Image: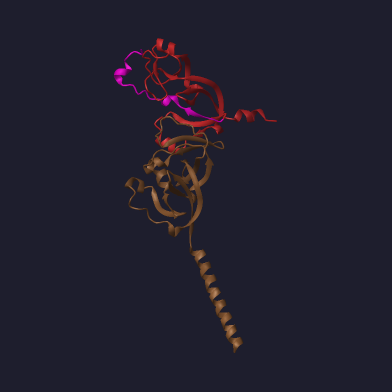
Amino acid sequence: MIAPETTNCQEGLSVLIFSSEGVKMAVGTEQIVGITDLEQAIEIQTQLMNVYGTPFTHEGGTKNGMVLLVKDDRAASGIVVDRLDEIAFVTIDTIQLIPPLIEATGRLKIIRGAFIKNDEMIFLADLTLLENKQHPEVNNAPVT
Amino acid sequence: MASETGNNKSALIFDELKKHGRAARIIDVEEEKVKLVIFSFSGEFYAFYGSDIKEILPMVNIFFVPGTPDFILGLINLRGDIESVIDVNYFLSLPACQRTQCGRIAIAEKGGIRSGIILESVTDVADVPVSSIKPSSSMLDSTTKEFVTGETMFKGKNVTVLAIGQILERIRG
């Protein structure tokens, strides 16, 4: 029999697992202040970017996709992802740091770790580290 | 008299045999050997020191990591642990290694840095005399030379011995 306190001691993280450009990623649910679809995010003129920090511009393309609203110092910004998969709880012992060679060479600094779920590698991201790579003049342009 | 000569002859023969035996044993002891993991790429042979290779795995699924350079192929699940996988061909000015079912992933560790290395095929794991590893030829360009420790012969073919530690250090920066 497992004592209740033993179960409570099992530290972990509630994560939202999503897919972006063919890569499965997860983010701690405490970083997400809201979820909306892309069409609505465009309507309310949320500042949008992808997981690479590149500004997202609709430009008459498809409006498929979901937007994770992340609170940063200034305002909520929207991270466009392809699909939301599930909310899961991952224990700390299953989360591993990114190997040093990846950490040293990777340009996507939001990836802080990874874990394996159902034989799939899922990258754990810290979306608060995402820098918007918009140029100032683009920053002021409305999302079309 | 005849018997004395016979005895002397036997003694001489025994002495000779002892000398040969001793010489053979001395050669065995003195010939220091080193283990090499020999692999091929485009018909050329390359090797890593066996002491730097922890294990050799069959090809497994490599998960792409966004935002990494071309020589970082991704991550693998190694019995629940996460390991990076690199393609050393980039550092040898060779075309990218092809991922095939007969390919292998060698887990290398040197200087506290650990990573998987994709190999198209592993030819052999062999003990070769240390003395047979000669300095690399001057035909290599300066970039490649930095990652080569020497050359040896294996089954009549030239084998370039690579300095995996240098490659891993270069990547880590």
In front here: A126 or A2? A126
Please state the extent of the stretch shown in magenta in the rendering.
A119-144
> Which residue does the image show at 59% across and 30% down from the upper left?
A10
Q: Residue B167, percent across and down? A: 40, 44
| Residue B162, horizontal then vertical, whole percent | 42, 48
Left or right of A110 in this view: A5: right
Query: Going 57% across and 86% down the picture, which residue do you hit?
Result: B5
Quarter placement of the N terminus of chain A: top right
Q: Left of B66 or right of it: where is A9?
A: right
Q: Is residue A134 inside the magenta stretch?
A: yes
Q: Is residue B162 above or below residue B14?
A: above
Q: Colour of chain B?
A: brown
Q: Is residue B18 magenta?
A: no
What color is chain A drawn in? red
Residue ID at (43%, 29%): B66
Residue reaching furthest to the right: A1
Whether residue A43 is situated above or below residue A14 in the rendered picture: above
Q: Nearer the viewer, residue A100 or B46?
A: B46
